[in-house]
Image (cartoon, helix red, strand yellow):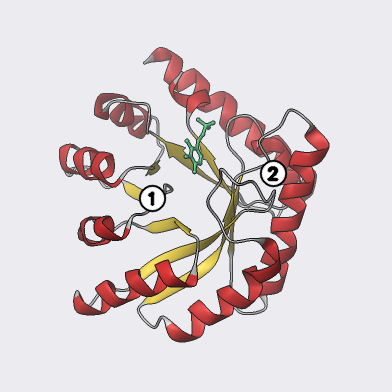
């Protein structure tokens, strides 16, 4: 637990340095990804002041949010969303779903949100490195798809984009994938987007320098 507090402090000060190198006005939000952690560990990070947490499996999100229901955590969903899990996810009322990766998936979520009379905050996930193994829409179609979701899915509130950096040790390639996502973010900002979710434990400082304003960090907090 002592470690967790120290890890969180280190990350917060690294985020601070990276964001100030962009601009004093560039604010970055930290989402602590708790997928490899227990509810007790989430609670101790919460007690250090952290409020936003994310999970990548609907079942884990349900379990942890149930166990921790007495504390006001802001829950994010960042994983692959199967159609048969959408209703379960909506029941949890997540603060933000980062991982909507197609118009079809958006429509499915929208349909169920309408039935439940809910509005759901989402991001469009972009596969900016064009990796077969990764979810996300390709960069070429991203802006068009974003606008289609925005105009047709009336129970969704699309707020921006999410991306996972290129899976490589080559910093240049990772940077390029962030820059490509950021270009799409700039396009959709004209239509009200305000969240650019990029950066994980291994690359969050680089992501911030490329314009990210939301980082999703797991292993370096909970290690
Ligand atoms: C696991 C995960 C993270 C956090 O990854 P770390 O490398 O542990 O910081 C961020 N985003 C998504 C989508 C994830 O699945």
Q: Residue furthest bottom?
A: 151
Residue receiving disc 2: 207
Residue 185 numbered mark, or none: none
Q: Earlier in the sequence, mark 1 or mark 2?
A: 1
Is residue 173 toward the left or the right of residue 4 in the image? right
- Whether residue 76 is situated above or below residue 53 in the rendered picture: below
What residue appears at the point 49 percent right and 77 percent down from the top-left corner? 149
Q: Position of residue 197 (x, y in %)?
A: 57, 52
Is residue 208 toward the left or the right of residue 175 in the image? left
State whether residue 124 appears in this view. Answer: yes
Residue 77 numbered mark, or none: 1
Quadrant position of residue 111: bottom left
Q: Give the tally of numbered discs.
A: 2
What residue appears at the point 40 percent right and 58 percent down from the top-left corner? 96
Q: Which sits in the foreground, 76 or 181?
A: 181
Q: Quadrant of the N terminus?
A: top left
Dot 1 falls on a residue whose secondary structure is strand
Q: Residue furthest right?
A: 172
Q: Residue furthest top?
A: 2
Q: Which sits in the foreground, 222 or 26?
A: 222
What residue appears at the point 33 percent right and 55 percent down from the top-left corner? 82
Q: Position of residue 109 (x, y in %)?
A: 33, 69
State whether residue 19 appears in this view. Answer: no
Q: Rate crowding at label 2 as few (under 14), some (14 to 19) or many (20 or more) other CA atoms within 10 Å.
A: many
What residue appears at the point 60 percent right and 45 percent down from the top-left corner? 164
**Real-space Cα separation, disc 1 to disc 2, in angstroms:** 20 Å
- Whether residue 129 is situated above or below residue 167 in the rendered picture: below
- Whether residue 181 is situated above or below residue 119 in the rendered picture: above
């Amino acid at each position: 637990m002592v470690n967790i507090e120290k890890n969180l402090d280190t990350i917060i000060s690294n985020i601070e340095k990276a964001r100030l190198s962009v601009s004093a006005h560039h604010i970055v939000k930290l989402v602590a990804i708790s997928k490899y952690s227990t509810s007790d560990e989430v609670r101790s990070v919460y007690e250090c002041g952290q409020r936003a947490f994310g999970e990548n499996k609907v079942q884990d999100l349900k379990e942890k949010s149930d166990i921790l229901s007495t504390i006001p955590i802001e829950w994010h969903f960042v994983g692959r969303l199967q159609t048969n899990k959408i209703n379960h996810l909506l029941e949890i009322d997540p603060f933000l779903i980062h991982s909507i990766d197609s118009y079809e998936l958006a429509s499915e979520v929208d349909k169920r949100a309408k039935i439940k009379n809910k509005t759901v905050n989402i991001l469009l996930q972009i596969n900016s490195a064009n990796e077969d193994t990764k979810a996300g829409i390709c960069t070429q179609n991203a802006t068009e798809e974003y606008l289609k979701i925005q105009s047709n899915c009336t129970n969704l509130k699309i707020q921006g984009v999410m991306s996972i950096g290129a899976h490589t040790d080559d910093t240049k390639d990772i940077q390029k994938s962030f820059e490509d996502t950021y270009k799409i973010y700039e396009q959709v900002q004209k239509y009200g987007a305000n969240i650019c979710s990029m950066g994980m434990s291994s690359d969050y400082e680089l992501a911030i320098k490329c314009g990210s304003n939301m980082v999703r960090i797991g292993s370096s907090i909970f290690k």
